[in-house]
Amino acid sequence: MENRRTIKSYVLRSGRFTQKQKEAYDNYSQDFCIDYQENLLSFKETFQNENEVILDIGFGMGDSVREISQAMPDKNFIGIEVHKPGVGALAFDLKDLNIKNAKIISYDAVEVVKNMIPDSSVGGFHIFFPDPWQKKKHNKRRLLNEEFIEILAGKLKVGGYIYVATDWADYAEQVLDLLSANKKLKNSTAGFAQRAPWRPITKFEKKGLTKNHNIYDIWFTKV
């Protein structure tokens, strides 16, 4: 299944897996993780309610999912991340803080969205600080390309949104152009957007700021 996509937008790096993260990964996965499957997910069965669902793609250590799900208890969140330390960290937080409106899928985001998410069902996609693959020869690995944006647009409800944030100027310009070219989507503003007040400043964003990078927020809605 996973070998369908020969070019991946991620590399499974051997990051430090702390004891707390490992224990949470081992002990809490059954409570918060959804197994990858090539069948459409029922949001109602998953969350036992009919609240709007937001997907956070590549959540890193889970800060954005943790903070936003707490701030928006009337919405449901699914975080997608392949790296085990991040999955363990978020699983620990969900358990420790008794967060009921968030789940995790640890698998390739493109395959998850394509095969598990029903069409016209998602309230929004959060894609905060995706790997920029800054070397030109690696640009083809970038998650956000024309094909994946078309898939995302098909999964959104009318009025649903795609919210991207990055600190890499050329990636920001590329994403802005790609989203603008999709006829299902409309920019919420002229050019780049203001940071939503509820979007937390992530670890990757802080790293960018220490390097004097500008931060680019992009918000498009489905029409």
Image (cartoon, rainbow, N blue to C red):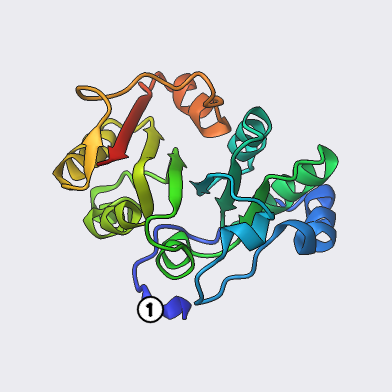
Q: Nearer the viewer, residue 77 or 48?
A: 48
Identify whether 142 is placed above or below 202.
below
Q: Nearer the viewer, residue 15 or 147?
A: 147
User: Mark 1 Cα within 10 Å, few/some/many (few <14, many 20+)?
Assistant: few
At 37% from the left edge and 48% from the top edge, which residue is drawn? Answer: 157
Residue 84 visible to the viewer: no
Q: Nearer the viewer, residue 62 or 36?
A: 36
Q: Position of residue 40 (x, y in %)?
A: 50, 70
Say which quarter of the image contains residue 32. Answer: bottom right
Q: Position of residue 172 (x, y in %)?
A: 28, 34
Identify whether 147 is placed above or below 92.
below
At 63% from the left edge and 36% from the top edge, which residue is drawn? Answer: 74
Three-letter residue code for mark 1: Arg
SS for tag 1? helix
The residue carrying mark 1 is 4
Left/right of residue 87 with respect to residue 177 in the rendered view: right
